[in-house]
Amino acid sequence: MAKNITPRATDYSQWYTDVIREAKLADYAPVKGCMVIRPNGYAIWESIQQHLDRMFKDTGHVNAYFPLLIPQSFLEKEAEHVDGFALECALVTHSGLERVEGETKLRPKGKLEEAYVIRPTSETVIWAMYKNWIQSYRDLPLLINQWANIYRWELRTRLFLRTAEFLWQEGHTAHATAEEAREETLKMLGVYKTFAQDYMAMPVIAGEKTEGQKFPGAVSTYTIEAMMQDRKALQCGTSHFLGQNFAKAFDVTFQNDKNELDYVWATSWGVSTRLIGAIIMTHADDDGMIIPPRLAQWPVYAVPIYRKEDEKSKVIGAMQKVLDDLKRKYDIRSILDDRSTATPGFKFAESELLGYPLRIELGPRDLAADQLIITKRHNREKVTLPLAQAVDHIPRILDEIQMDLYTRACKTLEENTREINSYDELKDFVAADGGFALAHWAGTTEDEKRLQEETKATVRVIPENAPAEKGKCILTGRESNRRVVIAKAY
Amino acid sequence: MAKNITPRATDYSQWYTDVIREAKLADYAPVKGCMVIRPNGYAIWESIQQHLDRMFKDTGHVNAYFPLLIPQSFLEKEAEHVDGFALECALVTHSGLERVEGETKLRPKGKLEEAYVIRPTSETVIWAMYKNWIQSYRDLPLLINQWANIYRWELRTRLFLRTAEFLWQEGHTAHATAEEAREETLKMLGVYKTFAQDYMAMPVIAGEKTEGQKFPGAVSTYTIEAMMQDRKALQCGTSHFLGQNFAKAFDVTFQNDKNELDYVWATSWGVSTRLIGAIIMTHADDDGMIIPPRLAQWPVYAVPIYRKEDEKSKVIGAMQKVLDDLKRKYDIRSILDDRSTATPGFKFAESELLGYPLRIELGPRDLAADQLIITKRHNREKVTLPLAQAVDHIPRILDEIQMDLYTRACKTLEENTREINSYDELKDFVAADGGFALAHWAGTTEDEKRLQEETKATVRVIPENAPAEKGKCILTGRESNRRVVIAKAY
């Protein structure tokens, strides 16, 4: 294990912080609760953006940009919405600084007539604009996404998982019918699920949130929930059916095809830089980061090995040819680390911290034997490849690594998911950090609060496609017809 | 000309606003001085980002993300810097809103101990981080770029050109020597110049700014300046050599290769959504927007023409084949507008407003004659192409359009640039909105203020590679050895 990383078994939370520091993914910023996303972390976000953006466009969405600041009065137009975000608002109250004779610190200048809130989410300002853009059913649907920064002042923060400022995308769509809006809500939940599985190599449980866990202002909220290596749940993305709530708050009506005036139906959906935290907590190990190949900017990291100067050019030449062919034939990007200031051993250790999925070594003896050595980061497996065929093997091996990571994560999820049939059993299961409890639940929002107070667990998701099964709610004894997922969560 | 667009000759400023509204590029937001970038405008920004980001990466840069909020005290550490931005700061002073019994409006809750400023630029917070990341010459150079939103409260705003919030990229690099930092400053100026010419089809004059027009905190500032159709100058991108100013303000030192401690050398450089305004003001006409093909998300807009139902499927089938081949063979994206709710005439007019560079029409008679008609948006030229070869002609025609736009803009620049040899001549030239004056200048910052007060013009740029020429400053009569560009500017 790496010397600067606390093992997971010793202190999971410290392990997470250590991996982020050693892999140079992020840093705490000199602003309370905020982070700096360092180049290695941001590269993962760029991959996430690239693939998700394509998936959004393939489903008919376009991007736009709405203002960072929201007039306080806008936020107040939807009562549940403002109550949901009130405590987390950052308030802009003044414009300008001025020097005052005899004072070293500059003073705030003009007080604003109305305070602005830095967007904690953009429904209100977007629906204020939609009012101008929507008149008739011919203007619908409006399928808009925004990539933006968000500010929610949080008490307890953790890099990537919960920070005051974070980056995200927020889709905001407008529809002529409730049915179409509900379809959109589920379609985007599906996009998130596919992305998590196919790109992040992370299994998720998709389904609906309970009444008490809904987005403030939503009619219903859907979620994808993943299990981290400490068996806690992480909510990784949400998709909301907003009904006509925001259309009513901002008076957005349209003429339908029967020439009647009706309020517009809405959805919103988002994922954030939290996904980077999910990748770390799903795949990384005691030696550092592991990046799934399909999200790695540089899936291949290559170390030339040589002692003498005349070996150097031969080794690097042969290696460069492999890497160039990989780029040309398969569009796979790589790093050739030919730093003379570091030894191969140092480079190996560093590359394990940084999490490149596949490492290539090539030395004079390999060259003489017409071979190169590859090492898979996630399981340390070494494979010797014939030099001439290496280029055509590597894409397949990267696919295998991607699949391996997914299978490994599925195993963690399956092994730590259990049917639980009584409240006492649940308490024990949760206290032992057992994982996901599949239990019958028919409680109210009040019951959910009691559940959380007594066990620290919450109802994470009502899984879609859960088999119908008669049972009794583990807390209230009321009749229930499907099991939900109950777990401790981030 | 389009009926909702004021002709340029009648009211240039109104024309600009009309084009933005009719092409649905942006809207004023319900937040003072802010804009909403609508999907059509944002698509141009996405193209700009995509190409520039590749150019940054090809020159060795990586992306990262730094916090939106900057502690006021950070901004104050570099005196010129804070004075330069003090009046434009948006101040965050409170966290949280709370309901107070009997009041309808929520009240600000916690007052912050220290106010935060929404970043007007990020040098200060970035150099506070660089202090942690840089110890030795081995950590240098640090070549980091950030794509972000920026807030500068402006009194007079104009969509894209000057808004309180805007989107931009800001490069912030750290170097071991002054020479290397100066090289970087000019390299990135070169990237901007190439991008403006090759992608925006916009000629620019690159060079240095005068002392009075420097970025607050810079040792020297370089700029690319373009001429808009009303012959005013628009500063389109800047690159700054910051010397050791920010390293000293934030105490960022490093061990050089001689084992001595020295302050780090810095650059910063940026372009913003202002570039979209530059594209409009360079290429659009009285009929609406014109997007240069290399920045168009959809370079080709196709209208099928038919009356009877049996014609429809044949026409659309043939058209779709052309478009599919364009995508497959040349990766050129297109829109097939088969809306049944609009006539071809309506679609033609709308496509001119929106500015697709190339339009394709195809009807039953064309099909019978094995041909299709294309129309170039920028000059209305119609060309009939044999259907079978259309796909292979279109990429070349798009290149010609791109080149035509550039040539046309070069002509505007050349025809409206004149050598001016006396102050009186300059006053007349500027009063008549003549364009760019090439004049000898050796004035001080005070002289520049006088120039601006008396003529409304400023020294825009000291052109790089300007031929050496002895002369007298038109204002002060002092000796000068090269001409500068003086013009009114946005």
Image (spheres, coloured by chain):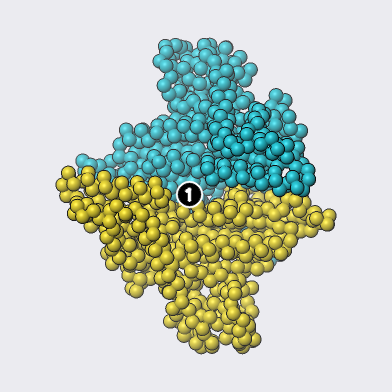
Chain colours: A cyan, B yellow
Marked residue chain, label 1: A
Residue drawn at (36%, 42%) of the image = A174
Figure quadrant of the N terminus of chain A: top right
Q: Is residue A356 visible?
A: no
Residue A386's place in the image compared with A447, above or below, is below
Residue A253's place in the image compared with B32, above or below, is above
Between residue A421 and residue B176, name the one nearer to us. Answer: B176
Q: Position of residue B461 (x, y in %)?
A: 57, 73
| Image quadrant in which you'd find residue A155 | top right
Residue B420's place in the image compared with B256, above or below, is below
Between residue B442 and residue A149, name the one nearer to us. Answer: B442
Residue type for callout 1: Ile
Q: Position of residue B363 (x, y in %)?
A: 21, 53
Between residue A62 and residue A86, name the one nearer to us. Answer: A62
Residue drawn at (73%, 37%) of the image = A365
Residue drawn at (55%, 19%) of the image = A414
Q: Give the residue at mark 1.
A: A70
Q: Is residue B208 visible?
A: yes
Residue A58's place in the image compared with A458, above or below, is below
Residue drawn at (63%, 33%) of the image = A385
> Is residue A380 found left or right of B284 in the rendered image?
right
Crowd tier of the residue under label 1, counting other residues whose Cα lies within 10 Å: few below 14, some 14–19, many 20 or above: many
User: Residue lying furthest left in this view?
Assistant: B308
